[in-house]
Image: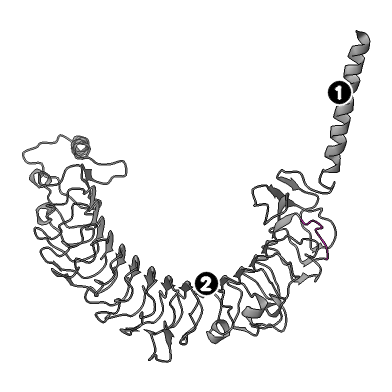
Amino acid sequence: MMLGHKFTIFFILTIVYLAKTQHDKNQIPPWDFKPNVWTITNRPVVTDLRTPIPIKTTVSTISTFPSNSCPPHSHVFSFSNVGLQKIGRDFIHSNDVVSLSLDNNNINDISPFAFRKMQNLKYLDLSGNNISKEKLLLLPRSANLQTLIIDNNRDSHDPVTEALKEYEIFQNLKHLHLRNSQLRNFQIYFYMTTPILTHLYLDNNNISSSDAVFDNIPATLTHLYLNKNVIDRVKQGKLRHLQKLSMDDNVITQVCFEKCEDKSISLKDAAEMQFLSLARNLISEISSDAFSDTSRLLKLDLSGNKIADITKGTFNKTMMISNLSLADNILVTVPDVCSIMHLRNLDLSGNRISAVFSGTFCINLRTLEYLHLSNNVITTIETRAFRSLQSLKYLDLSGNRLKQLPAHWVYSWYIQELHLERNNFTELDSISLINIKELRNIYLDENPMPVLTAGSFNLLPGHVRIHLKNMGVEYQCEQCTCENEDDEDNKNDDYENKNGNDDNGNDSWE
């Protein structure tokens, strides 16, 4: 019996030993990191990273990458803001590293062999360093690198250059960020340097020549960001493959098709364009055929320009637009947008529109849900002015000069939020809310309504909340004798509580 027990124990120990031996053979190398996140701290600041990594850093393991795109153990390294100045050769020797952040240091020198032992590196962030501008893309190559970020670069080299000149080839790079890096020009070819690039970010530089960009981008590029530069022209046929172009805060004066002025952007052949933003340029003219090739356009932002008029039919080929902003221009009438049959959000705030007439909004605008007309000079809204907008949920008429709204000025059961702040309404009876069955909030802040009568509230739709901040409503107490100021204050407090004063001191009624 005893012998049988010993044999059983010996057999179990043998099985355990064999299993452990097999597990050790399949185990990761001893230098690999465990699947945890931790911090290693040996000294606070390192200026030269040429040896193993005895510095403060954060290392994490990613285990959710697809097996066909990342190694089994995918590590993320972060060396942000630790005072690095130089990156030496082979400073990390691991093909498991997929993400490396070296941002917000003082790096001005990177060894040509720095990343050669990280063959699966896909994401590299070098933002906020001191790399020479002409060598921003002369970085050690990593065969699988997909995202490279070199934003906010501070070039302190002497003499200072303003152009990219030298480069390596990044065969798999798709996202390149070069924002706020004092760039003026490019003497490289993006279609050679980054042959499959899809997203290019060049915001907040000093780029003046669009040719330096548009003549060099690869056909794979779909998203281009050029906000806050000094570009004044994009020539015909340069937007052929782009799906999104953001050029806010430049100096374009005209949007056109073929017959273009000097400072213009031509949208000819922009057949793939879905998102176009030209906010805060100097645009004063839009040619009637400007959008002839942009039938796929979904979002258009022309806010903050000098547009005074838009020719009828300008948007005939852009029926798919869902968001259109013409805010902060100098329009005096509501432009013709009837052909935009899928429009959901229209922003006309901050213009010089004085009236909304019957028929201004045609029946084709059945899908419009959000309409912004704030901060105009509107004094007149005619009967049935918004009747065609059957899906309207949000209407902003704040900051105008309205004194009254006629009966049947709107015929939509679906409006839920109505903004009438900063107008000239003197009493609730001057605001007709007939047929607005779904109204939940109406904002009447800062209107000159000295007296509110109880009868006015009886005409309001059920469940509506009225916001009356800073109204200056007078409380008149006839034939009341107050023995002292404290009694008067108590009575005023009781009045406020009875009339729905909220916790913020704003008057509201339900």
Please state if 497 lies on the left or on the right of 451 as rendered: right
Q: For mark 1, does the 10 Å Cα neighbourhood hold few (<14), some (14 to 19), or many (20 or more) residues? A: few
Q: Position of residue 98 (x, y in %)?
A: 70, 57
Looking at the picture, tell me which residue is in the foreground, 456 or 222: 222
Q: Which residue is mark 1?
A: 12
Query: Which span is picked out in magenta?
Result: 89-95
Q: Nearer the viewer, residue 191 or 43?
A: 191
Q: What residue is rendered at 59% in x and 78% in y? A: 218
Please give the name of the residue rendered at 18% of the width and 72% of the height, measured from the top-left corner.
354
Q: Tell me which corner region of the image, top left, top right, bottom left or bottom right, holds residue 338.
A: bottom left
As drawn, is 319 to the left or to the right of 177? left
Specify the label residue 222 is tagged with.
2
Name which quarter of the figure residue 198 lies in: bottom right
Q: Quadrant of the N terminus?
A: top right
Residue 93 magenta-highlighted: yes
Q: Is residue 268 magenta?
A: no
Q: Residue furthest top?
A: 1
Q: Is residue 67 visible?
A: yes
Residue 340 position within the rendered picture, expressed as x and y whole percent measured from the top left: 29, 70
Residues at marks 2 and 1, CA–CA distance in whole angstroms: 62 Å
Is the Cβ of the residue at disc 2 closer than 8 Å to that at disc 1?
A: no
- Say above or below: 48 vs 488: below
Q: How many marks?
A: 2
The quadrant where residue 319 appears: bottom left
Residue 21 located left or right of residue 260: right
Quarter containing the C terminus: top left
Q: Could you tell me residue 310's position as x and y percent?
A: 27, 80
Compared to 310, does 72 lie above or below? above
